[in-house]
Amino acid sequence: SAVISQKPSRDICQRGTSLTIQCQVDSQVTMMFWYRQQPGQSLTLIATANQGSEATYESGFVIDKFPISRPNLTFSTLTVSNMSPEDSSIYLCSAPSPKEQFFGPGTRLTVL
Amino acid sequence: SQQGEEDPQALSIQEGENATMNCSYKTSINNLQWYRQNSGRGLVHLILIRSNEREKHSGRLRVTLDTSKKSSSLLITASRAADTASYFCATDGHNQGGKLIFGQGTELSVKP
């Protein structure tokens, strides 16, 4: 099994600023994913964080708004850029295994 | 694009009753997973059922999968107030690199 931690656990930010969320896995994993959960909604996949290459974004998400880094097999960051109140969500990272997909505890972001 | 419809969207039952939640999806899958989330907190993995399996049990949970109908159901027997949470299905599709597509979720309320 994998244990995933995220930092920060929550933050309150002003519009127009950027926040970088860190995701740390306690073992090497090939794939890492970033999800967004808007208030009262389900999870939506933002992108796949690829080690050594650019992230692969899902429809509706772009690199300028959500730049992602994946410097090694245990770590990734997601930046939410030029934030607006609509970016208020929980952001979660995950890593799959053959038996389940492990999720971090999430970062609760509020943009004022 | 997101796939996965769940019904009902909300379900309210009395303690001791059974709760059934349904999930439909659109494409071929490797497996389907069910998760629980309490009040916007982290996701708890409940059960994974592979595409070649039809039924799986774990404690008070029973999951069925009908790939011909592209649907799954989660049954919670003898429900408890502590089962109150949101429940999500998520599919791991063929050639999708392990990323999960989540259903819209069912909000279950178990009244004591």
Image: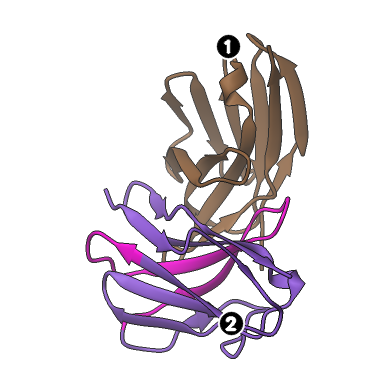
Chain colours: A purple, B brown
* Residue A30 painted magenta: yes
The dot on residue A18 is: 2
Query: Residue placed at 43% from the left, 41% from the top?
Result: B48
Q: Nearer the viewer, mark 2 or mark 1?
A: 2
- Asked if labels 1 and 2 touch by Cβ distance under 8 angstroms, the answer is no
Q: Chain of mark 1?
A: B
- State the SS at label 1: loop
The answer to whether residue B37 is above or below residue A15 is above
- State the SS at label 2: loop
Q: Which residue bears the numbered disc 1?
A: B78
Mark 2 packing: few (<14 Cα in 10 Å), some, or many (20+)?
some
Farthest-out residue, left: A27
Identify the magenta region. Answer: A24-51
Query: Residue placed at 22% from the left, 61% from the top?
Result: A27
Looking at the picture, tell me which residue is in the foreground, A13 or A76.
A13
Spatial distance from mark 2 to mark 1, Cα to Cα? 46 Å
- The quadrant the C terminus of chain A occupies is bottom right
* Residue B102 painted magenta: no
- Which percent across, then down, holds residue A44? 62, 63
Q: Chain of mark 2?
A: A
